[in-house]
Amino acid sequence: MTRTSTFDFEYDPSVADFAVSKRAYLDAHSDVSYHYIATSALVIDTRYVSIPRVLLLQRAASDSKPNLWEPPGGACDDEDASILNGAARELLEEAGLRATRITELVGDPHFFTTRSGKLVCRFYFAALVDISDENTPVVKLNPKEHQQFVWATLDEVKAKQVGDIALQFTRDEVHQTVLRALQSTNN
């Protein structure tokens, strides 16, 4: 089954380099050692709360890296119209949220090797989402991938604790990038 993922969202000129397909991006960066791209969408809720909060998802117990926390994200597919569309697609698939604007690249890209030995470059994007509820975006998890979510403040991410929920992140780089996104929002 072929699918195209083209979503209706705006993006800041600072991320225009990612408004191309994964193949076009890799062809334009032939000097890189990776051939796979992943994305994450950092959704920070600042509209109706006095303290910004970021959306974090807990991986399903049956998935790889079970029970660990991360922002919505995943592989950029060949069918994605652009890398930014890949981020928007993953956000919709994993959290049921529709991106309205991708505002910036957060931090440096992170590199990791999959269990099958593929070298992957992950880009993190700050994303605004459609607010259909007057207080908080309505999150709808895909239970095959994630089992719960939290909206965490900067202090909670620093402490790796939201109420009685411990936040153990998939990687230290993920934790550092989430902190960076919240710190830039608080400034």
Image (tube, grey):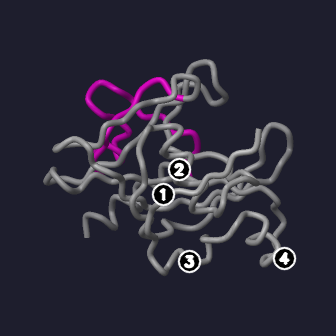
- For the residue pair 12 and 157, the one nearer the viewer reads as 12
Tell me which numbered mark, 3 or 2, is placed earlier along the sequence: 3
Q: Are marks 1 and 3 in contact (CB under 8 Å)?
A: no
Q: Are marks 1 and 2 in contact (CB under 8 Å)?
A: yes
Q: Is residue 54 above or below residue 82?
A: above
Cα separation, mark 3 vs mark 4, equals: 20 Å
What amino acid type should be assigned to the residue bearing mark 2?
A: Val
Between label 3 and label 4, give the one nearer the viewer.
Answer: 3
What amino acid type should be assigned to the residue bearing mark 4?
A: Asp
At a point 57% along the width and 19% down the height, the residue shown is 61
Magenta region, residue range:
146-173
What amino acid type should be assigned to the residue bearing mark 1?
A: Thr
What amino acid type should be assigned to the residue bearing mark 3?
A: Ala
Q: Is residue 113 above or below residue 166?
A: below
Mark 3 crowdedness (10 Å alpha carbons): few <14, some 14-19, many ≥20: few
Q: Position of residue 90 (x, y in %)?
A: 56, 46
Cα separation, mark 1 vs mark 2, equals: 5 Å
> Label 3, on which residue?
16
The circle drawn on residue 177 is 1
Cα separation, mark 4 vs mark 2, equals: 25 Å
Mark 1 crowdedness (10 Å alpha carbons): few <14, some 14-19, many ≥20: some
Cα separation, mark 1 vs mark 4, equals: 25 Å
Cα separation, mark 3 vs mark 2, equals: 23 Å
The circle drawn on residue 174 is 2
**Callout 3 secondary element:** helix
> Label 4, on which residue?
31
Mark 4 crowdedness (10 Å alpha carbons): few <14, some 14-19, many ≥20: few
Tell me which numbered mark, 1 or 4, is placed earlier along the sequence: 4
